[in-house]
Structures are given as structure tokens and as C-alpha cells.
Amino acid sequence: MISVPRDGAAAARAGLERVVRAGGVVVFPADGVYGLACDPGRAEAIERIHALKGREAGKPSAVMFFVPLAMRELISTLGPRTRDALAALLPGPVTLVVDNPERLYPLACGEDPGRLGLRLIEGPLAGAGVAVFQTSANPAGERPANRLDAVASAILTGADLAIDGGELSGSPSMVIDLTEIEAGGGWAVLRPGVLSSSELARRLAPSRGR
């Protein structure tokens, strides 16, 4: 285990990078709840995560980034309205579902490779140089954990590394569907969260004005 308060954020970032690049699974602090992370290109690691959660195989998950530069390839495939929307909402405690014309990260997309969930978060792991397949670190159907000691013991022992980031807010990310915005359409809130409807509309107004 790596503790951010005890060992520092740099050690936590290095541990995350090392285990993900080796094909392992990490329990880590996201911005609201603890998550499970692995290399989004490694099917065997993703299968381990599904097994640890008791989660249906093939269910879509978000790809999480910790530094904007790591999103460069993905962003280059998106249209200008979608890029504006990402700039208005990220980083933050949101998951954005975007059109995925190049079918990037197909293992995270589930049955529809044309749609991709993505995240860019702040916090102690910001700056880590890997993208990860991520989902909350709780058995399927149960409440996500906001402390490492609240994560199910089977998940903790089944992971290759656990990173303790202290107590988090307990709020999962807000999920916003942006797949219609490029064609001049609107957006849909799939899971409410930190942004009010008015604040979301304010931030996304320039994206629709192109």
C-alpha cells in the first residue's frame, strides 16, 4: 500500500504508473470515491476488474486521464464543439460521454465503440502519465467507498496495489452525454452531480454557439 499523506503524491503517482504499465490492477483515490484502474488496452486486466466487482463483462467504463497532454491523441479526433465542451468541463468530477469516430479505447466502450466515456481529474494523482480504464472500487450494486478501509476486503486483496488518499467526498462523478453536441444538439445528464442545470448550461453555451 502507498499512503499519499505518509509517502507523498509523487510516490503515489509513480506506483500507479508502474503497476498499470505492468498490466496490474490498482485501487486508487479518484475525486469523490475510490476506484479500480488498469491499462485500458489490456483485456486480461479489465477482466480481473470485472471479476473483482462481480460486474457484467463488457459493460462500458470511462477512460481516465491525469494530465491533459495524455489526451492529445483522443482530442485530435473530436470536432470543435466537443473540444470546447471538454475545455469547459475538465478537469473536474465529471464523466463525459463523447462521440468516438476513431474507435479509440474499444475495450472501455462496451457494445458501442462509437461512444466513449472520459475523465480528467485533479487531486494527488494529477500528473500521472498513464491513461486508465476505471470504475468504482465496490461490488456491483453496492455503494462506492470514500475511504480505503471501506473498500471490500476481496477487492483490496485482489488488486496489485492500493493507494490511500484519505477520506473523499463520497460523491461519484456526474455523467454527461455530449454525443449530440457536435451536430448542434444538446447534452443529457445521465447521472446528476456537482453541477446544477444552470451552471452546466452556462459552461456549455459557447459550444453550441459555433
Image (cartoon, rainbow, N blue to C red):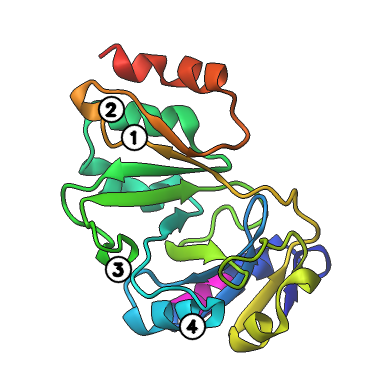
Asked if the stretch drawn in magenta spans residue 17, the answer is: yes
Residue on which the image places disc 2: 181
Q: Is residue 49 above or below residue 174?
A: below
Which quadrant: the C terminus?
top left
**Earlier sequence position, callout 4 versus callout 1:** 4
Question: Counting other residues with Cα less than 10 Å from the Cα at mark 2, is it few (<14), some (14-19), or many (20 or more)?
Answer: many
Q: Which mark is residue 107?
A: 3
Residue under the point 61% across and 58% down:
125
Identity of the residue drawn at 27% across and 49% down: 115
Whether residue 130 is visible to the viewer of this picture, yes or no, is no
Quarter-of-image position of residue 97: top left
Marks 3 & 1, CB-CB < 8 Å contact:
no
Camera-nearest label, 4 or 2: 4
Residue at horizontal 48 percent and vertical 74 percent from the top: 55
Q: Which mark is residue 51?
A: 4
Is 89 drawn above or below residue 35 in the view shown? Answer: above
